[in-house]
Image (cartoon, rainbow, N blue to C red):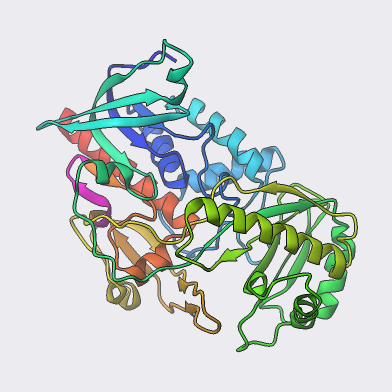
Amino acid sequence: MKLKKKYDVIIIGGGTAGSACAYICGKNNLKTLLIEKESYLGGSITSSLVIPAMKTAKNAINTEFFNDLYDNLYKINGSITYIDGNNGWFNPELVKITLDKMMKDSHVDVLFETNIQNVKENLSSCNVTIYDDNSLVNSDNLLESIETKYVVDATGDAKICQLLNFEFLKNDNSTQPVNLRFIMAGINTKKFTHWIMDLDKDRNVTTSTELDNGIYMSTAYTWDTNRNWALAPYFKEAVAKGVLLEEDTNYFQLFSVAGTTDSIAFNAPRLLNSKLSRSEIYIKGRESIFRLSQFCKKYLPGFENAYISSIANKIGVRISNRVKCKYIYTKDDLLSGKKFDNPAVISNYPIDIHSKDKNKSVLKQVYKEYQLPIEALMVKDNFYVAGRCLSAEFEAQAALRIIPSCCSMGEAVAKDIAGKIKHQNC
């Protein structure tokens, strides 16, 4: 790809927030470059298999990207709307294909397997120096410096803000465990769905529906003792017989995969030891995945011939570095439903904090919609963040880290930049 020497905006990180930002920038006729270190877009949906996206507020704003993603996926049998009205049930592999198409349609330049070497700020612009990971084997892919008016850090951990030594919010040692998701295929989903629906009468936990000639379902179990889980006897027996370790049972959540007839995605295992290195986390995670797959084959009707078809390439991260922006969004702002002049997000998703300890996880319902201001995404007038690295207190971030909200953040940033450029050109 032949790059332009100047762009209106460069977005670094092609996850949900970065893709949303790039797509809307492109649709607003901005010269847009999206840089992604992996070989595909989608971030948490694709790299980490975080499906489905959680349902958000009825009056959500900045949803054009999310709705267009759903519509494009639906045309290729890659999305459904579940019985609760949640249209975030996606097929992660088809998301990769669809996001490529959406960026092409909106005339966004995309660079894969590319990293940032340096960012230098001038009074009215930035110079971003990039390098291609393939440069070691291809001498044509040398360092290249590109000028831009605006930069958006959508890297999740705010890697570019770290590079520029921007100020971060203090970490009070609050954390949430990561997980490593996987998918199993070869499942008789009709047999399993009928069995689990008969076993578990709690429709706040276990649900199913028929859509587009397929059966879709969801169920869950955790090791918390403050709820009567229908699957509890099976997990207890599996631990007693050595099929599972007790730590494997801490969190177990299943969802059907849009457009498939024999696949189920697992929001598990949740990995509890925060002192492990990344390498150790992946090894421990895959060991746990294998044990969980054997548990399913032994104890869950319909899984007799099932097999692991996919393991996430990246762990799912719930909390990360949070940049200090022009506004720090607080828990009180969220719970009070404080209104802002220029909201980026409207949501009512609960404060969702996972714990490594039994009966310590928090799911605090929010009974009114809340707003996140664009200023919580604006580090400087020409530098933004989008996604889970937003400027927010720990508990507020725990409610805003979900995929639809991250998409809204990216879209809001794009619209704010487009408005500024339009004003400058007047």
Q: Using residue 405 as the reference point, say whether residue 226 is left or right of it.
A: right
Residue 266 locus on image (x, y percent) = 68, 60
Q: Is residue 208 above or below residue 109?
A: below
Q: Using residue 186 as the reference point, say whether residue 397 is left or right of it.
A: left
The quarter holding residue 348 reads: bottom left
Q: Can residue 31 be seen in this view?
A: no
**Residue found farthest to the top:** 140
Picture residue at 67% right of the left edge, 53% below the top:
182
Residue 58 locus on image (x, y percent) = 49, 65
Residue 322 locus on image (x, y percent) = 30, 57
The quarter holding residue 173 reads: bottom left
Picture mark count = 0
Look at the image and tell me in which quarter the C terminus lies: top left
Q: Using residue 405 as the reference point, say whether residue 237 is left or right of it.
A: right
Q: What stretch is highlighted in magenta?
A: 376-382
Residue in front for this viewpoint, 75 or 12: 12
Say whether residue 139 is magenta. Answer: no
Q: Is residue 122 visible?
A: yes
Picture residue at 55% right of the left edge, 82% below the top:
358
Q: Is residue 380 above or below residue 193?
A: above
Look at the image and tell me in which quarter the N terminus lies: top left
Residue in front for this viewpoint, 276 or 426: 276
Residue in front for this viewpoint, 81 or 128: 128
Q: In this view, does 342 lie above or below 270?
A: above
Picture residue at 19% right of the left edge, 54% below the top:
167
Residue 122 locus on image (x, y percent) = 12, 31
